[in-house]
Amino acid sequence: MGELSVKNDEFRRLWATHNVKEKGHGIKRIRHPLVGDMALSYETLHLPDDEEQCLVVYHAEPDSESAQALHLLASWGADAVRADVGGA
């Protein structure tokens, strides 16, 4: 990088902008300590009014082991919320 920066003005200018394209979708593999391995599809949505912020949405394929793991985690979270408000 140093040699390119010294010898090429255009490279130096582009490198200084840090304008790197992110991959906006794909599959992430996550190991959760309670439910184990999950394969989650993700999509990155950029907000039109603020380029510095984005929303990343994760989901599992229907009826997959990952979907079952997410459902289990969600049920534990819902139980905790109900307990906090005195509903459980």
Image (cartoon, rainbow, N blue to C red):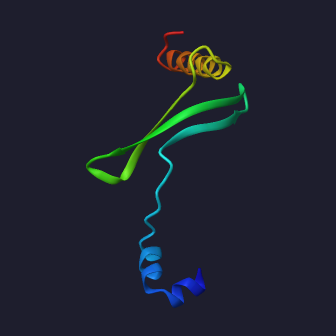
- Residue 35 drawn at (x, y percent): 71, 25
Of 72 and 61, which appears nearest the observer? 61
Tell which residue pokes out farthest to the bottom in this image.
7
Tell which residue pokes out farthest to the left in this image.
49
Q: Quadrant of the N terminus?
A: bottom right
Look at the picture and state if 59 lies above or below 52.
above
Task: Give the image quarter of residue 36.
Answer: top right
Side (left or right) of 24 relative to 32: left
Number of dots carrying numbers = 0
- Residue 43 drawn at (x, y percent): 47, 37
Of 30 and 88, which appears nearest the observer? 30
Q: Quadrant of the C terminus?
A: top right
Side (left or right) of 46 relative to 74: left
Q: Residue at x 55, y 32 (%)?
A: 41
Side (left or right) of 53 relative to 73: left
Tell which residue pokes out farthest to the top in this image.
88
Look at the picture and state if 47 lies above or below 41.
below
- Residue 37 drawn at (x, y percent): 72, 30
Q: Residue at x 46, y 57 (%)?
A: 21
Look at the picture and state if 48 lies above or below 72.
below
Q: Residue at x 47, y 62 (%)?
A: 20
- Residue 52 drawn at (x, y percent): 37, 55
